[in-house]
Amino acid sequence: MSKDYYEILGVSRDADADAVKKAYRKKAMKVHPDVAQTDDAAEQFKELNEAYEVLKDPQKRAVYDRGGDPMGHGGGMGGGFGGMGGFGTAGGFDFTDLIGSMFGQATSRGPRSRVRKGQDALVGMSLTLSEAAFGVTKPLQVDTAVLCSRCSGSGSADGNEPVTCRTCHGAGEVTQVQRSFLGDIRTSSPCPTCRGYGSVIPDPCPECSGEGRVRSTRTLNVKVPAGVDTGNRIHLASQGEVGAGGGAAGDLYVELRVLPHEDFTRQGADLETVVRVPMVAAALGTSVRVPTLDAEKEGATPEESVVDVEIPAGTQSGTRVSVRGKGVPKLRGNGRGDMGVTFLVQTPTKLDHEQRELLQQLAELRGEAGANLGHGREKGFFGKLRDAFEG
């Protein structure tokens, strides 16, 4: 043979089938007439196809290596594109392979599986503040695709097996041939009858209509760790959507939302609460018992449920004290946050006669009677300004 097919493809004489195929695709993208746009592109592409036609076939390659004519049985290779059977014949060029290689697309070969992995699912769960703080195992209803119990995922009724598609004969794809100035161009697409599976289910399961899965509501017990907050997600592996054909289930993600609390607000791991203190108690000083969030925890002891907080004499409204270690457990770490207690001093709105007299006496003793307000020893800015002009 005058042509060195190994040199044309750029491979060694001991190259395997994969190396031959890769070399062909690489060169085909360079010398194809629609790409190269050179005068001898068609001739180069013809020689490349000749080389690939011979070297990809073990029998033809063996004949060629022995110095024989691999196309000697009435199939001379000098007849132009038609002598090779054209692009659309069994020995021709598969345009789908070239386009897929040029644009990085994987070409489908053979039927695709009916069994596919299921998708992940996302659901929400609401928690009370104490559940989020101390953790809880809580039931959650989930509506997802589950395995069809009637056909066990096969999609066929009564255990019948799928049969080979008569349109594609099990290939999962059909080929169309179009003629062009280069010859016949062959393109492949999924079979419209079997949708690329290569087989059809003659008697689909009536429960799942051949999908192998049905939608169902089920209950899961979700373990929530201590210290979670709104926006945190819990990952449950293989608890999502079951795949078509009974494929493996995806994962389930539970997104948490912490409900508002009547007495506490949360800031990270810290809690804040407000304690209302009578005016007289704030003036004289006292001690109050403040409930903690632990009081809502199952099995909490009295010592955990309340803390004694000292109110110094003369405490003003808005004063805040911090109780260490009575906040929320830290989700990723040790210990707990603190509990902030803000005092709100309350002025009485209803007084009986005796209480009013006592307060009036106190006001007179302290110089706080209505006529004396604003005339104490300390003068304000405007008082000092008036004295300067009068002075």
Image: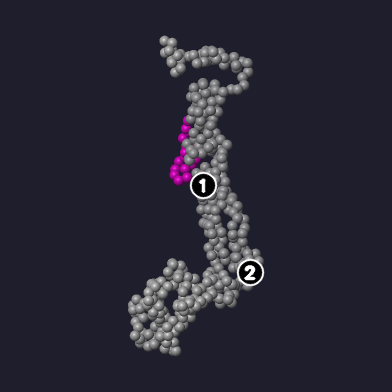
Who is closer to the viewer here, 323 or 169?
Answer: 169
Say above or below: 88 vs 381: below
Q: Residues within 10 Å of mark 2 (few under 14, many from 20)?
A: many
Gap between marks 1 and 2 measured at Cα: 42 Å
SS under mark 1 = loop
Q: Quadrant of residue 199?
A: bottom right
Type of amino acid under label 2: Pro
Tell me the residue that label 2 is attached to.
204
- 100 lies above or below 374: below
Residue found at x 63% / y 16%: 353
Residues in magenta? 321-337
**Picture coordinates of residue 343, whole percent (x, y):** 52, 28
Residue for point 42% across, 10% down: 391
Q: How is the image coloured?
A: one colour
Residue 311 visible in rendering: yes
Q: What percent of the width, then of the height, locates residue 42? A: 40, 78
Q: Is residue 332 magenta?
A: yes
- Viewer-nearest residue: 368 or 81: 81
- Residue at left 51%, top 44%? 229
* Main secondary-structure element of the magenta-colored stretch: loop
Please report the residue visible at 50 percent of the width from the left and 44 percent of the height from the top: 227
The residue type indicated by label 1 comes to: Gly
Label drawn at residue 377: none
Mark 1 highlights which residue? 231
User: Looking at the image, is mark 1 or mark 2 earlier in the sequence?
Assistant: 2
Residue 120, percent across and down?
A: 53, 57
